[in-house]
Image (spheres, helix red, strand yellow):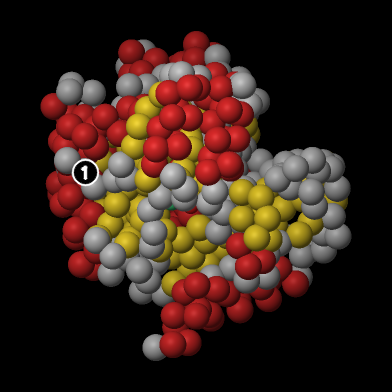
Amino acid sequence: MKLLLIGSGGREHALAWALAKSPKLTKLYAAPGNAGIAEVAELTDLDVTDHQAVTGFCRDKMIDLVVVGPEAPLVAGLVDDLDAAGIKAFGPTKEAAQLEGSKAFTKGVCDEAGIPTAAYGRFADVDAALAYVRAQGAPIVVKADGLAAGKGVVVAMTLEEAEDAVKACFEGTFGAAGAEVVIEEFLEGEEASFFVLSDGKNALALATAQDHKRAYDGDEGPNTGGMGAYSPAPVMTDAVVADVMRRIIEPTIATLARRGTPFKGVLYAGLMIGKDGPKLIEYNTRFGDPECQVLMMRLDSDLLDLILASVEGTLDAAEARWKDDAALTVVMAAKGYPGAYEKGTEIRGLKPVGSDGPAVFHAGTKRDGARVLANGGRVLNVTALGETVRAAQESAYRVVETIDWPEGFCRSDIGWRAIAREDKN
Ligand code: AMP
Ligand code: GLY
């Protein structure tokens, strides 16, 4: 099969690496890709916001399947346009991608299906929002409704912070994403990410992970797209997974199917596991980045087979097998990220990703002749397996040591929560 992969992050490098292992794959294109993806795919500088150009490319190259990595093309309706052109695509339609694109949409699904989530109010008016915040008190969570690249959420520990966040939203800090705000009850517990695959009717549990959203050690500093992750998440025991499938995932899939807008693709549930059981924080409609990197390291099944089962509606007969080992990934970012950072600095000491052993997945990189240059905020994902999270962590940081990139930085404590738990047991 000939595939086109859309995206350029570490997530897409991990997907490309996993897809390249499938005996069914004959050719992989990636748009736009990066220097690591180029090890297994032919890069094309196709403008993915131009859906006609994408369909044209697919016809021209006789692409059998398009795999969409990031959320923006999903929310923009790329899968709808490919479907309309008779080209198979993996990922949700524009309407189903509203589970990620609009927090208010997701809350509506939760109400309709009785899914456990934080109590909330939704406001298009600053005074009403402020009155609600004052009535509820702090801690409280203020969210811009639309896509704000993970930056539209303020967990306010004081009333003043909450009021400032509401005002900032309506003053246009998040652009159109902040035209409406969702104000939520503060949930206590441990966060985990859970990934499932759906074909519109059936849901297949994939695996669990934990992300590290803050830029610096000790979970300090600004929020980022994710500075490291590990899988599995110890808090997600088999019993919790079963509970989440029954009370959160299956009702969501059933509700979207009943509405006539079935969800196909990867559903990524951000969960809070607290005293009264798991609650949904949010949905994403794609693999997480960097969570995908640890999932792909642990996956023992053919990724292409699973994706085809999602596209073709045969997930009820599919099975996903995972290594028992833990996987851990350390993100190396350009100094300054998530604020301003320099591009174009040289990275030395990189080795191509092999079929086993630790893997350095590329995110923001590009090739300049024989040199690899940093080309983004998050740049490399050093990923390793181990019998324990601690062993995976040691292995990943050993590889970090071999990478010569003075302009980069990483956290030194990825996995700390799981390791503390391992040490206690
Ligand atoms: P979101 O973009 O909705 O995932 O929110 C970003 C982060 O804010 C989450 O990963 C949580 O750490 C935190 N968060 C969001 N909603 C809540 C909530 N209701 N209670 C506590 N923390 C939250
Ligand atoms: N790592 C968080 C995300 O992909 O949304």
- Crowd rating for badge 1 (residues with CA inside 10 Å; few <14, some 14–19, many 20+): many
Q: Give the amino acid at mark 1.
A: Ile
Report whether residue 76 is seen.
no
Dividing the picture into quarters, in which one does residue 319 lie? bottom left
Q: Position of residue 397 (x, y in %)?
A: 66, 73
Residue 276 vs residue 128, the one in the foreground = 128
Left or right: 330 with respect to 295? right
Dividing the picture into quarters, in which one does residue 400 lie? bottom right
Q: Position of residue 200 (x, y in %)?
A: 21, 34
Left or right: 80 with respect to 290? left
Quarter occupied by the N terminus: top left
Helix, strand or loop at label 1? It is loop
Left or right: 28 with respect to 298? right
Residue occupying the point 55% across, 73% down? 416
Residue 377 vs residue 3, the one in the foreground = 377
> Which residue was labeled with disc 1?
115
Dividing the picture into quarters, in which one does residue 98 lie? top left
Residue 409 vs residue 34, the one in the foreground = 409
* Number of dots carrying numbers: 1
Q: Position of residue 156 (x, y in %)?
A: 53, 46
Q: Position of residue 251 (x, y in %)?
A: 17, 41
Residue occupying the point 32% across, 62% down? 274
Height in image: 28 above or below 221? above
Quarter occupied by the C terminus: bottom left
Residue occupying the point 65% across, 60% down? 220
